[in-house]
Image (cartoon, rainbow, N blue to C red):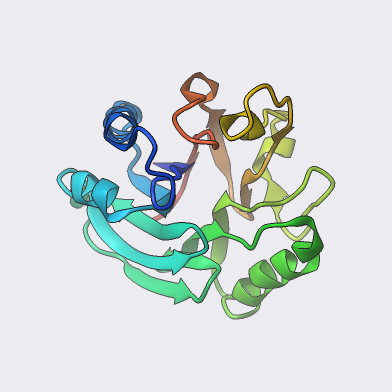
């Protein structure tokens, strides 16, 4: 099994304390040591640093920055595929991993499902894992796949409005993992609050 890690790092538009945040983000990624890294809202500054340790499989520009997949060099190269404004994926013989950065805002709920459904429709012969910033509200579900956090009864919020509005108590579970294959060791890194408005998460899953 491989360790996957996802993090909306918010370094493309938000340049506040950028050098400090880049240092912390890089240190934490190296410490967590994912085999495959899924980054949303990245800028080239972070990619330049990460490419010293990881191989960039592919990236696509979505709202708020670059949506990227990076892999440890020993894994070799994977075929990659771009999904317009939805994200980017890598493909193995029977599986596909998709780094998602779905459209935001409450009125786009149905379109978010459409974004996922289009990928499923065109990859029916593959096991699929969606991972990333889904921008889904608390009452939104995607019933076609297992919601990993729901499966393990972990409702930890991954997004914090107080990053932008000091004193706000609004928290949401925007970052999610949907899969139709076995997994283990789901984790939300609550100790990394304040580096971005999002928390990173990780999971172990089969991908070869």
The residue furthest top is 191
The residue drawn where x is 52% and y is 24% is: 193
The image position of residue 147, as x and y in percent, is: 70, 46
Q: Split into 4 quadrants, where in the image is the C terminus?
A: bottom left
The image position of residue 123, as x and y in percent, is: 57, 76
Q: Split into 4 quadrants, where in the image is the N terminus?
A: top left
The image position of residue 135, as x and y in percent, is: 66, 52
Q: Nearer the viewer, residue 125 or 142?
A: 142
Q: Is residue 174 above or below residue 106?
A: above
The residue drawn where x is 74% and y is 31% is: 170
The residue furthest bottom is 122
Q: Nearer the viewer, residue 85 or 56?
A: 85
Q: Nearer the viewer, residue 187 or 20?
A: 20
Q: Quadrant of residue 187?
A: top right
Q: Is residue 59 left or right of residue 135?
A: left
Q: Nearer the viewer, residue 148 or 108?
A: 108
The residue drawn where x is 39% and y is 37% is: 16
């Amino acid at each position: 099994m491989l360790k996957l890690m996802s993090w909306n790092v918010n370094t493309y538009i938000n340049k506040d304390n950028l050098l400090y945040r880049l240092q912390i983000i890089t240190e934490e990624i190296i410490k967590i040591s994912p085999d495959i890294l899924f980054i949303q809202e990245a800028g080239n500054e972070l990619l330049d640093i990460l490419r010293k340790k990881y191989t960039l499989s592919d990236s696509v520009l979505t709202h708020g920055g670059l949506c990227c997949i990076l892999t440890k060099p020993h894994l070799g190269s994977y075929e990659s595929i771009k999904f317009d404004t939805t994200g980017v994926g890598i493909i193995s013989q029977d599986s596909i991993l998709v780094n998602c950065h779905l459209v935001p805002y409450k009125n786009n709920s149905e379109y978010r499902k459409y974004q996922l459904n289009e990928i499923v429709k065109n990859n029916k012969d593959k096991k699929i894992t969606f991972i990333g910033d889904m921008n889904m509200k608390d009452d939104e579900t995607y019933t076609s796949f297992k919601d990993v956090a729901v499966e393990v009864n972990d409702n930890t919020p991954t997004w914090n409005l107080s990053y932008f509005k000091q004193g706000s108590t609004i928290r949401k579970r925007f970052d999610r993992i949907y899969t139709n294959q076995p997994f283990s060791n789901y984790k939300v890194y609550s100790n990394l609050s304040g580096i971005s408005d999002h928390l990173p998460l990780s999971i172990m899953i089969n991908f070869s």
